[in-house]
Image: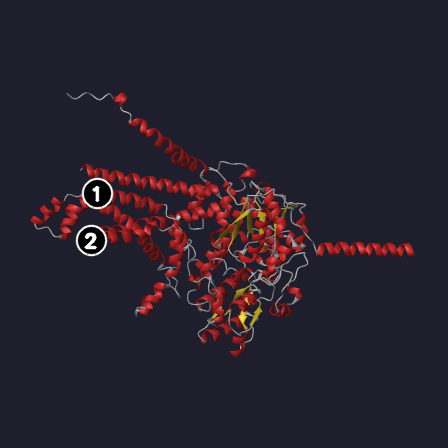
Amino acid sequence: MKKLLSLVLCLMLCLVSVSALAENVVVEAVPNEGQFEGQELSILVSAGWMDNRYDATIARFEETYGVTVDLQTIPADQYFDILLAGLANGTCSDVFWIQSNPFAIKSMIVDPENLCIDFTGADWAGVIPEARLAACQSDGKLYGLQIWHNSPEYVMLYNKTLFEELGLEVPTTYAELKDVCAKIAEQGITPWFLPGADGWQHQLAFFQIGGVYEEATPGLFDALNNNTATFADNEKMLEVLGQFKELSDLGYFGEDWIGTDSTNMANEYGDRTIAMAMNNASYVKQLHDELDTEDEWGMFLIPLGDNTWFPTSPAGPTMFGYKGTEHEDLVRAWFQFVCTPESLQEILDNSPNYTNLHVNVDIEQHWLPEEEAFMETVDPAKMNCCVLQNGTKYTNDYWMQFGQDMIAYVQGSIEANDVLKAMDGYRAEGAATAGDEAWK
Amino acid sequence: MVRPVNKKKVYPTWFLILPLVLYIVFFLFPSLLGIFYSFTDWSRNTSKTGLNFVGIKNYIEIFSSNKNYADGILNTLKFTIVSNLVKIIPALFLAIILYEGLKGMGVYRTIFYLPSIIPFVIIGILFTSVLNFKNGLLNNTLQAVGLGFLKQKWLSDLNVVWKSIYMVDAWRGMGYVMTIFMTGLAAIDKSYYEAARVDGANFWQRLWYVTLPMMRGAIMINLVFGITYGLKVFDIVYVLTNGGPGHATEVMTTYSFQLYGAGQYGMATAFNSILLVITAVVGILIVRTMSRKGAA
């Protein structure tokens, strides 16, 4: 009996240890033996993915190994063209990023075996949470490192104080949203700030409500991935596009939302020239830091299509090592270096808007009360459906083109169903490029 | 006594070899290779599937796709014509005004020429800011001087966006065109003008009967440069609108760039091949027409 008890205790101890290992992975930097002295590491990244949150880590990396880091930050609307051209002609930077999801490596990089460094078995692999691993792996091999936050992404971030002053309730349906927008517009305030000139933001209104489409047509995501369903003629999608256009026609996105970018968004919030916009929950932190205002902020789900679904998204900007690099060991050292607890804490602390990092490392997170309050309003049963762009193959790859089509529709150049048909066309192209059997 | 030229000793032929080799290696060969690839399914997946000959499938796709590639071709042709008109005509008059002895000619010439050496990326950043509807310099200035009714959504209104592109393109390129015209004007013997004045010719008659015929070379250079620039236009569109709003300002090269970015290299080279053929045909036509007139 005593032996059995001690065996059970031993087993429990082992399980706790394994579980602790899975929850708190500690990675150590590659020892510096002067092996990289004088080398240069080039990193190609889209604006907004590294920002200054990596500056201190890059500086320490340079100092530790006596190397230089050439950080090439490209505007978001040009990034993928430049990256894919670099990958195609063999001139890619040592490290590059893509907006990855479980399908992105095959559809965007296409040939990871020949283009990406295989990190399978790397010390830092355990840093990535299980839910994000699929976006970093292809055919069982680890290629990417995704360090991203776990805050609600691109929900409606609104001026709570302003809403209270105007006697407005948080809208939960499209009809309520329209009513709220009308009342805000009467005050000379732009109800929903939508920076169309960025080229990538307005699509979120359509894609972040993936659960709405799946709920309207159960099995839609699988059918889209098996090429047995199309975007075209999907009634719920047509309804949402119609609502989007109606809000635009009514001027609720602002007088020239198509020609406006997001550069001044924080100030617009602060000046109360706008009431709400789609943002990451952690944008609240940026507002607190940048604005001199006592206004309070809140969040609610995008109500297009009467949405009640949380934008679950196991995706995010992900870092890859280019296989054609002349400094593969340096690239490996960089990935290892980024995953040390010190670096991860540094990245989080220096971030202008992250409140947390979704990693299996014990670091001090900085969750906001606003985020916690918002999460309490979401039905946990409505958190299990992925956003449309990351739950379906080849969709996210044509994000910018879909955005252009949405604008063409809003301006009356094409019909709503043409936007959806075009997406089917893009996805077919992506499938052909990836050699997807379902499209043959 | 004039000694007959020994053609075997005429060595300028040798001088041709180096530029000819460079031309073949860097222009002719890549162009022919591009045409070859336009008949294949060259894509990002080629490393896995190999390169396959697909005949004219890429060309059929371009002209039959629902993606309005044909609009991109029409927009390119439209840009070529309009952008040259709005540059060449004002540049000609500017050149004449400056050459007629305006004080501070050198200063003006420098000021007009300067924009043409500014990189397109800078121009893009500058003018997307200047033309911003809400906070842009242009609309704010119009508002400040009481012309608020002229305010426009310069880069997002379908009826205005092309005019904005022409305006910025003219701002950038006019000085360069003007400089070539001034060189042409400098080559015209003053005695022609004196004779015309004696005969009582007014400004327009002198322009029509003396200046323009004598400037045929400068006009031809500007036309050839302008048309080839117009047909391969990319930068100015990319930095100002990136083909938008929607697809309103897509041109052949922006579509080609998108296709290349999407990994459809075969289609992208088919687009470029069409551009190559159009450019070659138009270029040959211009040179032949102007040469014939010159000979006459």
Cα distance in 3D space between marks 1 and 2:
19 Å
* Residue at disc 2, secondary structure: helix
Along the polypeptide, which appears first: circle 1 or circle 2? 2
Q: Which quarter of the image is occupied by the N terminus of chain B?
A: top left
* Residue type highlighted by circle 1: Arg
Taking the spot 60% from the left edge, 59% from the top edge, the residue there is A348
Kindly identify which chain the residue marked by label 2 belongs to. Answer: B
Expressed as whole percent of the image width and height from the top left, the position of residue B176 reads 29, 48
Q: Is residue B234 visible?
A: yes
* Residue at disc 1, secondary structure: helix
Of residues A255 and A97, the one nearer the viewer is A97
Tell me the tag on residue A165: none
* Residue type highlighted by circle 2: Ile
Taking the spot 18% from the left edge, 20% from the top edge, the residue there is B3
Expressed as whole percent of the image width and height from the top left, the position of residue A374 reads 61, 69
Q: In the image, is residue B74 above or below residue A286?
A: above
Q: In the image, is residue B263 above or below residue A196?
A: above
Of residues B75 and A30, the one nearer the viewer is A30
Disc 1 vs disc 2: which is toward the camera?
2
* Dot 1 crowding, Cα within 10 Å, few <14, some 14–19, many 20+: some
Q: Which quarter of the image is occupied by the C terminus of chain B?
A: top left
Which residue position holds label 1?
A: B216
Which residue position holds label 2?
A: B97
